[in-house]
Image (tube, rainbow, N blue to C red):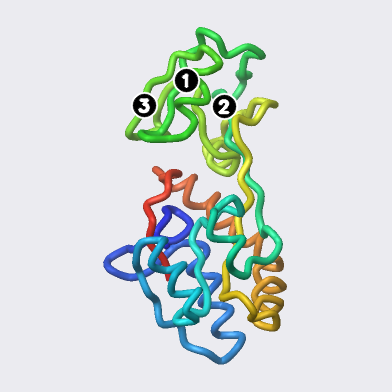
Amino acid sequence: MRHEPWACLRDGKPAGPEVEAVEQLASKLGAHVVWTVAPESELMHGLKEHALDLVVGGVSAKSPWVKDLGAGQPFLTTRLLVGAPPGQSVPEQLEGASVAVAPGSVAGPLLEKKGARVHEADRLHQAPGLRAAWDWQLEGWGYVPGPKPLREEKWVWVVPSGENRWLLTVDRFVLAQATDIRQGLLALARSGPTPGSPEKTRP
């Protein structure tokens, strides 16, 4: 699934922290990755039909597909937070506060419920003042995160149902790779814009 920056296409080739992890898994197993890029529903149907072995790329543990397929423990938990520039802090009450969000971000409606003044920024990493983003983005930008998350997400890799041995292999591997995947996300945040909203497609 293409969900930047977890997994995406760059110059027509799969790229991103999770893509790199899958390639490492294949190398460890002496296997070769054949990537399939398609809408999430098609990929999950591919798993149900055992036409695919693994789906990755920003798959939320909350996905309705997960319960019908094989998903191990979440390998990473991220929090959507409001962050402040270095040396500043996020106000305890966000009512009336101006907060920048990425276009289409789920942060917008959540902040509006709190009375914040939300404005979308195409280049969120350059927006002045408060920004709403994932914890790894704020860390990569040097921003100070607020204490109260707007949302929390747990991320998983998904395999066909009934493939218990394969699921165990995948689960052990990705849990061991969690730190490296997060470091990859941090590196992308530090290098510039990092989209945080899913655009569905996958390996």
Q: In the rendering, at what x and y percent does residue 101 appear? A: 43, 29
Q: Tell which circle, 2 or 3, labels the residue nearer the N-terminal end.
A: 2
Q: Tell which circle, 1 or 3, labels the residue nearer the N-terminal end.
A: 1
Q: CA distance from mark 1 to mark 3?
A: 9 Å
Foreground residue among 18 and 65: 65
Q: CA distance from mark 2 to mark 3?
A: 14 Å
Foreground residue among 32 and 142: 32
Amino acid found under the numbered disc labelled 1? Val
Q: In the rendering, at what x and y percent does residue 14 appear? A: 38, 69
Tag shown at residue 99: 1
At 49% from the left and 30% from the top, the residue drawn is 107
Residue receiving disc 3: 120
Q: Please tell me how crowded label 3 is: few (under 14), some (14-19), or many (20+) other residues with Cα within 10 Å.
A: some
In the figure, is residue 127 to the left or right of 70?
left
Q: Does dot 2 land on a helix, a strand or a loop?
A: strand
Amino acid found under the numbered disc labelled 2? Val
| Quadrant of the rendered image containing residue 179 | bottom right
Q: In the rendering, at what x and y percent does residue 51 appear? A: 44, 82
In the figure, is residue 37 to the left or right of 171?
left
Q: Is residue 154 above or below residue 165?
A: above
Q: Does dot 3 land on a helix, a strand or a loop?
A: strand
Amino acid found under the numbered disc labelled 3? Glu
Q: Is residue 196 above or below residue 68?
A: above
